[in-house]
Image: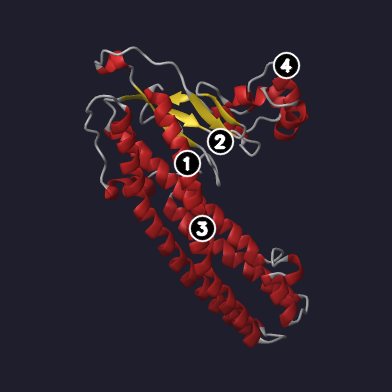
Amino acid sequence: MAVNDEILDRLTDRDIALQRFYKGATRRVLNSLKASEARIIERLLTAGDNLSRTRQEKLLKDIRAIIATAYKDAFGVLQIDMDGLVGVESEFIAKALNETIPIVVNTVTPASAQILAAAKARPFQGKLLADVYRELPDAAYRKIRDTIRLGYLEGQTTPQIIRAVRGTAIQGYKNGVFNKARRDMEATVRTALSHTANVARESVYGDNERLIKGVQWVSTLDGRTSPICQARDGVVYPPNKGPRPPAHFNCRSSTTPIIKSWKELGIDLKEAPEGTRASMNGQIPAGSTFDDFLRKKDSKFQNELLGKPRADKFRAGESVRSFVDNSGRTLTLDELNR
């Protein structure tokens, strides 16, 4: 197996393990928020019905304090996982390079503090981690505040307001304001950890640039892949340049390094043929892109993923890369036709 394919194979397995880790980390963070939900319900129960405007504002002030404390604690739990992840992931990537390149290369592993600083300084979705940490509790509070204010304005009883905030048992508590806050937190945890893991990889690539001539975008090959990740799959960017995952919240894409050829590394070996990469249907040639993967699927799958108008253009020869602009925004059909 060629070196680049062996590294890709290792990192594909690694990405599966990371998704499991993200799931566990999300559960730990959400568990830390549960106590705050109970405290908010308790505070609503003690407030009673028909509150004056002054008492409403006092209630909301108390709830805001509960949310602020809860999110501070939750982000503390997340930070512990991020602190551990940067060291583990950077060491894994450096070890993969050492074990797959058939000469002693003495790879450099960046310090964890350096990687964490880069993760905090590098934006994703146009925001820094500090922005996300500030905006998330504010958004949760505003939604709860508006629900409570509307309830009192409409003359709802305290149990009715609580049902709107918490949701109902018959709906599995998925129809309340709390559930929206949980989903936002889950997406944030997964994306923050993915961002951290990819920054760790990028830091290793950058510190070992003498070995690496490019960084390839690797998207998950299945029916849930976003248009931007479909378009970027297989694209090779220069080290320290170009976009990097996550491309959006809950992004599952990652990267793999493209090692210089044996000749470029000064090694007298014959270049090896390509290997394979994983997809939802098993192994496919490593050179395959999302386009190649999708062209082997039936029309129903293509229509469900792309929508029939775009799927028709895809079957007529268009690439999925033509469906987004340079920033990754999905083009409208009018823009696509033009």
Q: CA distance from mark 3 to mark 1?
A: 16 Å
Q: CA distance from mark 4 to mark 2?
A: 24 Å
The residue tagged 1 is 15
Label 3 vs label 4, nearer the camera: 3
Where is residue 210? Give x, y as percent: 26, 25
Which one is nearer the viewer's eye here, 124 or 51? Answer: 124
Q: Amino acid at mark 3?
A: Thr
Q: Residue at x 71, y 86 (%)?
A: 49
Q: Is residue 133 above or below residue 89?
A: below
Q: Is residue 194 above or below residue 335?
A: below
Of the numbered discs in the image, which one, if any, rests on residue 26?
3
- Quarter holding the N terminus is top left
Q: Amino acid at mark 1?
A: Asp
The residue tagged 4 is 316
Direction from residue 257 to residue 95 in the image, left or right: left
Q: Is residue 263 above or below residue 177?
A: above
Label 3 vs label 1, nearer the camera: 1
Q: Residue at x 58, y 67 (%)?
A: 141
Q: Residue at x 49, y 70 (%)?
A: 70
